[in-house]
Each structure stands twice: as C-alpha cells, then as structure tokens.
Amino acid sequence: MPDPALNDELREELRRLENADLLRSRRMLESPQSARVVVDNRPCLAFASNDYLGLANHPAIIAAAIAGVQAFGVGAGASHLITGHSSAHHALEKDLARFVDFPAALLFSTGYMANIGTVTALAGRGDAIFSDALNHASLIDAARLSRADIHRYPHLDVDALGKSLAACRARRKLVISDAVFSMDGDIAPVPTLLALCERHDAYLLLDDAHGFGVLGTGGRGVLEHFAIQSPRIIYMATLGKAAGVAGAFVAGSTELIRFLIQRARTYIYTTAMPSLLACAVSASLTVIADESWRRQHLQRLIARLKSGFDSNAWRLLPSDTPIQPLLLGSNQAALRVSAALNELGILIPAIRPPTVPEGSARLRISLSAAHSEADVSELISALREVEAHCLNEPAPAMRNAG
Ligand SMILES: *Cc1c(COP(=O)(O)O)cnc(C)c1O
C-alpha cells in the first residue's frame, strides 16, 4: 500500500513550523510541580508553572485526595446527569459558590470546557459577543462555536468596547474577558467593564483562571481585588492553577446554574471529574483561605523581581501578578534566551505565536509561593548574565528549547 498523501502533507507542515522556529516539543517532568523540578533528567529551578501558591504538592491536599479515592474510588463512572454526580462534587459546588460570594456554582472538568459550555449555552445566532483581543484560546473558540456575532475589541480598550456596545442592536450582549491575561499578567479593568455592561444592558463573563487564589486578601480572586459584585457578572475560574488540583467552575445566579445544567454541552456530555479531585479542591479552598502568608510571600517575590530588574536593558511587561513576561520579539530570540537560561539550570519556556501575537514572543516568567527570595535572586543574576551575553554575541548556538 502506498504511503497515504496525508503523512506527506503533515511532514511538510511540520517542516514549515520548524523553519519558522515555531515547532513545539514537550519536556518531561519527573518530579512533582515545585520551585525545583527534575525535567528531562536534569534538576532545575523552574519559573514555568501556574502553581502560583505552591499547592500542587501540598500535604493536606494530597491527604484529602487519598481520603477521596478511598471513599469514592478512582473513576466517576458516568456523567453528572446520569450517576456521576457525587456528594463530594455537590459539597464542593456549595463551597465554591460561598467562597466567591455567588448564589450558586457548577463544576466543569476543565477551564476550556467551562468556557465552551457556558458561552455556547448563553449566546447563539442573533446574539453578540464582545471579546478582548488577547483573550484565552478557550474564550475565542467558545465565541466562534456559539455562532453569535463576534466584536473583537483591542486589548483593554474600553472606549472601543463602549462604542461597539452602543452601536449593537443584538438581543443579548455578552462581554467576555480574561480577568488576568494569561500571557501578559495585566488585570482587566473590571469596574469599567461592568459599568459599560450596566449602561448597555450587557452581561460580563470573567475568566479568572489566573486571579482565583491569588488576587484579593482572601484569595477570592478578581472581584475581591476590586471589591465589586453584580448580578450581571458570570464568574469562571479554574482549579488547576493556584488551587493546585484540576477542573474549573462557573458561578452566578441559581437560574444561570440550573440553566447550564440543562444546556452546557461540555457539562452534559462528558464523564464527571473523579470525586477524589473534588475532595482535593475542597481541601485546597481551606488552604487558600487559611494560609494567606502564601499570597503575602508571593507579593514580596513579585516586588523583588521587578525592582531587581530595574537596571536591565531588557524590560518586563508591566504586571502586578505572578505572571512577569519578558518581551523578546522574535521566536528565535525567545528560544535562544530560554536555552541560555536552561544552561544555567533555570527553566522558563519561550512563548511563541499563535499563543501570543506575531512578533511578540516572550519568556513567561511565573512566580510561585513555592519560590524563596534566594530563588528570585538566582533568577535575576541568571537573566543579567544571559542579557550581557546576548548583547555581546548576537548568535550563540541554539539548543532545543521546546
Ligand atoms: C488555563 C486557562 C484556561 C483553561 O483552563 P484548563 O482548566 O487548563 O482547561 C482558561 N482560561 C484561561 C485564561 C486560562 O489561562
């Protein structure tokens, strides 16, 4: 049998990606997520995860997962609407709603699924979605799948959004935005977005994947940070980042949650997340609330990195969150700097298009409460050394940086 044409086409496409420095590869992690990890057989200091509070390997959360597996077994065995919905899921939904101060909440298996399910349930043909240009891929895909008219506004441009909302005659209007932008670390102007939604009778879906657990003195996320709440807000957050486990939830009115149970396809047509994960997340909520030192320590690390970077020619993008991107521009530059840091035992992945816009490749430095002040000092010295080297020698040999 001849080799099917498809493989030739795929090989060609992969070659094109490689030539454009866009080929991605997977590193292999051989330890729990932490400040120091073993990757591809080498120990290194990592600024590369979304485990912002250092909870992915927390003993109390591990213990809750083990108790959960003993009580409920491994697999949920069915979707929530058949027999997969356990008392652990149910209790967690109540805890989550209370934690973020909404009447009700619904668990999803992933954040990607939460966004797809929620947006497609709420908006359809004849409706309008207003989407920040730098929104996460899951929100972009959700808007496309919904078949609503999509109005994309420039990043954080509330004037453009206001004009677009004012001109819109759609039946239902939904503004969707990352609360903390995943590759930039900046925070959406939520009070202004909300005021616009109120003025133009629109609803606001906030994706707080990177704010939940991190923002606000209690870690309750972006709404605690701004001290606002509104029945116009539909709140979504993920549980695999600062919460250290897996999954996501949507919070809002009881009507919203009852409706999503009927209509969110990524909720209905999928097996429930294992109950042991719900048990682990419940324990994580307690740690997030009780161990506020983690947020305080994280803020100190953020301040230290920013001030330690003052003297450099390279600039961090303006961000007050644990996401501290170093903009490098070309894919090749981002790969080169990432590889040079790797030589010094520091892991920071290069982020390239299409994850970020063309010509804005960057290192996404992410800090965690698991890091020490000494870890951040080590990072600053390594960045200075690599910067000096790059400025003097424009083209060192390139290693595979993923
Ligand atoms: C990570 C992320 C998601 C997806 O969440 P998962 O649980 O990883 O699927 C959604 N939105 C944003 C902004 C994210 O950063």
Image (cartoon, grey):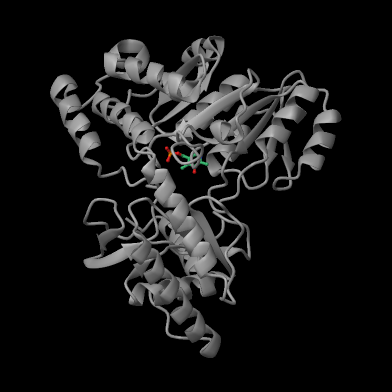
Q: Position of residue 140 (x, y in %)?
A: 60, 39
In the drawing, does residue 62 fall left or right of residue 163?
A: left
Nearest the viewer among 118 and 95 is 95
Nearest the viewer among 158 and 308 is 308
Quarter of the image with the N terminus is: bottom left
Residue 141 lies in what quarter of the image? top right
Nearest the viewer among 30 and 36 is 36
Quarter of the image with the C terminus is: bottom left
Q: Is residue 293 visible?
A: yes
Residue 38 lies in what quarter of the image? bottom left
Outermost left residue:
70
How many marks are shown on the rendered structure?
0
156 relative to 289, above or below: below
381 relative to 300, above or below: below
Q: Residue at x 47, y 14 (%)?
A: 261
Q: Position of residue 82 (x, y in %)?
A: 32, 11
Q: Position of residue 232 (x, y in %)?
A: 65, 20
Q: Residue at x 44, y 19 (%)?
A: 98
In the drawing, does residue 289 fall left or right of residue 69?
A: right
152 relative to 339, above or below: above
In the drawing, does residue 163 fall left or right of residue 211?
A: right
Q: Is residue 366 visible?
A: no
Q: Residue at x 46, y 60 (%)?
A: 365
Outermost bottom residue:
392
